Amino acid sequence: MEIEEKHECQFVKRTVMISGKKLKNGGSVKIGKICPSYIKVHKKDNQLIVEYSSTHLWHQNEIGKLRLTTADRAQLAGKLSTGVPIQKVLNDVRDCVEETALKHLHLIEKRDLHIIKRDYNINKCFTKRHENDFMSDDIATHLGKDDFCIIIMTDFQAEMLVKFGNDKICVDGTHGLNSYSFQLYILLVVDEYGNEIPVAFCLSNKSDTATYKLFFKTVKTLVGIIKSYVFMSDDEPVFYNAWCSVMGPVSKQLLCTWHVLRSWNKNLSKIYCHEKKAIVFKTLKSLMYETDENAFNTELLKILNYLQNDLDTADFGMTTEIMNMADSNNNIILFDMAKNEMFDINDNLKILRRKLQRSYTIATNKHEITVDVLNGVQLVVFGGPRAMFSEAEFNCLHKYIDLGGSVLVLFSEGGEKELHTNINYLLEEFGIMVNSDYVLRTHYYLYFHPKECLVKDGVVNEAVAKYLDRENESTSKCISFVFPYGASLNVAKPAAPILTSGSVAYPLNRPLCAFYSASKYSNKVKKGKLAVIGSGHLLTDKYINWEENDKIREILFDFLITNNITLNEVDANDPETSDYKMVPDIGMLSSRVRTCLQLQESLNNTGHFLFSADNINSLIDTKLCSLNTSMLPDAVEAYKTLNVPHNQLQLIPPMFNDTLPVLQFAVYPPPFQELSSPFLELFDLDSIFGSEKSFLSNLAKNCLEAQSSEKTIEDNIIKFIIDINDNLEIIVHSNDCKEILQTVFSFINNLKK
């Protein structure tokens, strides 16, 4: 009979110890001696014989070292499966200590309950989450049968969102709720006092882009589109991307300070020198609280150069968070002033400058265009150049676009001939050319000048309607704009027309604005872009607020700076534009009269032309314009028809002399100076012209108003009687109240007799 299995007491010291193994924080349960308790299992003749010794020596059964019984585990699993929170289960278990003896059940922790949930396969239907609460999980993109999403917004919250949502929008997630199998996301705004106001709540067991889009689409259905200036969230892009896809792009995106510091602390481990690690963190933290934009950009460049040039900090300087800071610093829009531009950012583009300064740094250039000038510039604007470019400048601009830069060119009426420039040489390489013509409106509507063209059906690319969130409307009529004093364009691939002159302006349905993007024809990470518009006047202070011209401004700069606008491939490849047809100069042709070559003369039987006088006269229409009396009988007959007497007109004798009215002398009486008004400032008219009744009522009113804490009612009555006696002279020179009353009563008594 051999021993199949043998189980010893868990407190028995091992005979062989693993060298170098660290002791647990809770200490060891080994007693260093031999406990006689054991279990031996023998197998004989297909039978199991168990030998058991229950005697324990040299130790006690510590509660903390024992295992939960099967009944206790089943009881806890039953509560967890019904949805009771973990903290509630722990509180209930520990509250029952006084009722029963202390057991291992009373000492369980959260990790024990998580193990039970794992062993009993509880909550297996819930979505798997990332170990970090704030990170999104795109495992599932649709709500399933067991998923839920609850969105809460009151009428007051909707009102606050509409009132303050155009300034700042914040989205925050309440972290640490994974144990409850749902997440809480809050949409907040900031009021005029700087206080945060929650305006919407979203509770869901899913945390992915589809859930956030559903949240924002529901808010959009209730309050409409919210065009916010600032969007603030954590450093994960899911909130921002979902908001932009539903509500449209945002000018500025801010990150939560807590998440920025956490990302820095996480990546500081890449700096092995502790002194440099402390210096870098302190410098970055001081930069975070810098409010001056110019000082921030200057200090940021210094920090980036230091991090990327030092071997100890190079790895930290190349992290995603630091590179994003470097990209955010590249927000310079350069307006060229070296070519005597027609549109000056400091003169007739002041409103445009104010709008751009909210999100970008505005700079000007008055020197030749070189690589150093364009270094670090995100967008270059040429506002109607009126000078020639050199070949070196064209090469520099071409290279700048190839490396991912953006260029905006504004033109005016007459094209290159009027502006005396040669920039078409650069534009033609990207499929765009500005014509030397004028865009006119063929008939009057709203605006008096024909060169101030109102275009209501000029959109030829669906990307504009999608950007404006007007996809339900006709693409061509999704926006109306005024195109003043501009020229038309010729556009070919790889460029694509965006706006045209429509059906009412001349030339008919020709491109007015065109975009070029390297995204379709290049595999580069950063795509170069070019935009040309035939009228720079559209962005000037005079016209930028006409119709929806400011929307055109948003489309131009968002396309060139951001990736929020993607051109529709079908519309770009086959735009709905007309050919550039030329019309004869009618004014010049009218001064050079020629015979009509299409007229055919009649032929005789022999095939010769007939040139007789009768034939020539027959070609003249004498009835087209003539003077005769053929209509006179009809005019005379009209007298009878209209019952008007037919009499000859009589002469009216003229009157050349007429008597004039009798003349009178113009005598005016001499003006005299009026007497000055009397000096009555201190003269009491009521005391002289007022009635006794009104006097007595005023006197009673004054006595009642003169009551104070020092005088009693009796004193006021005495004063009232004495004042009456002084004015009515009942008793001359008497101040005795009783005597005055006695005299009055005696007089009244005599009247009754």
Image (spheres, rainbow, N blue to C red):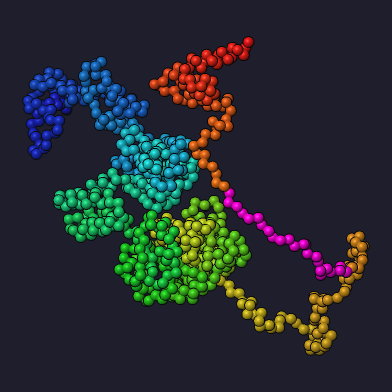
- Whether 670 is among the magenta residues is yes
Q: Is residue 534 left or right of residue 255?
A: right
Question: So how many labels did they put on this image?
Answer: 0
Q: Nearer the viewer, residue 34 or 547?
A: 547
For the N terminus, the image quarter is top left
Name the residue: 35% across, 59% down.
Answer: 361
Residue 186 drawn above or below residue 573 = above
Name the residue: 49% across, 76% down.
Answer: 417
Name the residue: 14% across, 26% down.
Answer: 10
Name the spot of residue 45 as percent of width and height, x first. 19, 23
For the C terminus, the image quarter is top right
- Whether 40 is among the magenta residues is no
Does residue 179 appear in this view? yes
Q: Nearer the viewer, residue 263 or 594?
A: 594
Quarter of the view holding residue 376: bottom left
Name the spot of residue 341 as percent of width and height, x first. 42, 70
Q: Report the span colored magenta.
A: 651-674
In the image as oriented, which residue stretches furthest toward the top? 753
Residue 72 drawn above or below residue 213 = above
Does residue 724 appear in this view? no
Name the spot of residue 76 as percent of width and height, x first. 30, 25
In the image as oriented, which residue stretches furthest toward the front? 732
Name the spot of residue 693 as percent of width and height, x first. 58, 25
Q: Is residue 381 left or right of residue 487?
A: left
* Overall secondary structure of the magenta section: loop
Q: Is residue 434 left or right of residue 357?
A: right
Residue 243 drawn above or below residue 645 = above
Q: Nearer the viewer, residue 391 or 121?
A: 391
Name the residue: 61% across, 74% down.
Answer: 583
